[in-house]
Image (cartoon, grey):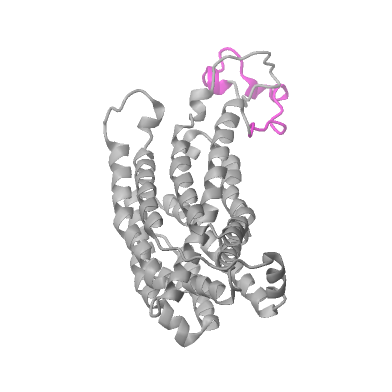
Amino acid sequence: MVDIGLNPFQVGILKCLEPVTIFTTSPIWGSIADKFNVRKGLLILCALGSALCFPLVILVPPVNLLETDEVENTSMRDMQVRNFSDVYGPSGQYLNVSENPGLVNREEWKPSIFTQASLITFTLIGILTLIDNIFVAGFLPLLDSSTMELCRRYPGTSYGGQRWLGAFAVVVFSPIAGFLFDWFENSDINLGDTYFLHSKYLPSFVLFTILMLVSVIPVCLMEVLPSKASPSISRELLVLFKDLHIVLTFVLFIVVGMCKGIVVAFLFIYLEELKASSMLMSLSLVITCLAETPCLIASGKVIEKLGYEVVFASGLFAYIVRLLGYSLLENPWMVLLIEPLHGVCYGLIWPCCTEYANHIAPEGMSSTLQSLAHAAKAGVGTIA
């Protein structure tokens, strides 16, 4: 977003949209799915919506293409110039304001947060991001609840035993995406004069669109079991959250979301400051997925043997060690030694959250509880 001319303030607002949207809309998706027993239809809708909406972001024109050089009704008070000697040369042949500080009040000068051009770009990206986040907020918890229902029907299977395939996909496609990113940025390929065809992010958007559309196929073929709708979802939730143990568990969900949000939001920014390449960042994703895969596969047995509380505590301790390790980094390549902790941070604790939400869900409310758990982890936790 910074590359297309948005300032950090605008980027911050856009980044806040995702957790806020998840927190507000995810429970709605789950409630609709349970109330009308339309989980599969909503899954397909959310997958197609995200696949078709998010790629449109690359079509938004950068700020510099919307800016003009025309100046109307401009006064010295409106001009964002601190030192005219920087414009006319060091000798200030025409006017040297630095020698007359009274002409410019530097203490009152502040750059504009929203120019007309940046406001257009910001608004367009904001609308597309909001719509995409609404679809994503429904897709993930509905997929989790469908997976848990299938695991319940087929004994011997577990959520983590299915989820590791997603980690495998990241292992395969992360280095491919990183390679395409660096290759396209440094290539001299001529795709025409349209601005978005020259964006270094174009391969990522194309790859995302293809994979999301492909994901619709297994969703259509997936067996989604019908369930008996709860007569009153709100009444069931009120009874459920009278249990202090369940309330405290959802507080833990929020803490887990906070830890994950810190890593997702700041790790790559930190690595960029350490001059890490796109390939290194992709490799870090590969390491995290390689670490989480065996943990996901074994998560069902680990949770059964140790219990939810011990797994939660282990995951939070791993996050403490992981974040402390990041703070001590000097060489960006050393991050590859820290990322294996993701195996516990995600590979164990995330299935624990998902299985617990399914465990406490009243009959006919699995999608609602998964949506609430997702809202706590990816919504409230990330906001906090």
Q: Residue shown at 50%/68% (left/top)?
A: 324
- Image position, residue 313 (x, y; %): 54, 79
- Image position, residue 90 (x, y; %): 52, 21
Image check: 257 left or right of 271? right
Image check: 362 left or right of 219? right
Magenta stretch, residue numbers: 85-113
Number of dots carrying numbers? 0
Q: Residue shown at 51%/84% (left/top)?
A: 307
Which quadrant, please, contains the C terminus?
A: bottom right
- Image position, residue 11 (x, y; %): 56, 43
- Image position, residue 204 (x, y; %): 37, 44
Please identify the dominant SS of the magenta region: loop
Q: Quadrant of residue 78?
A: top right
Image check: 120 left or right of 62? right
Foreground residue among 13 and 217: 217
Q: Residue shown at 61%/19% (left/top)?
A: 96
Task: Inspect the magenta stretch and tell me whether residue 288 lies in it.
Answer: no
Residue 292 appears anywhere in the view: no
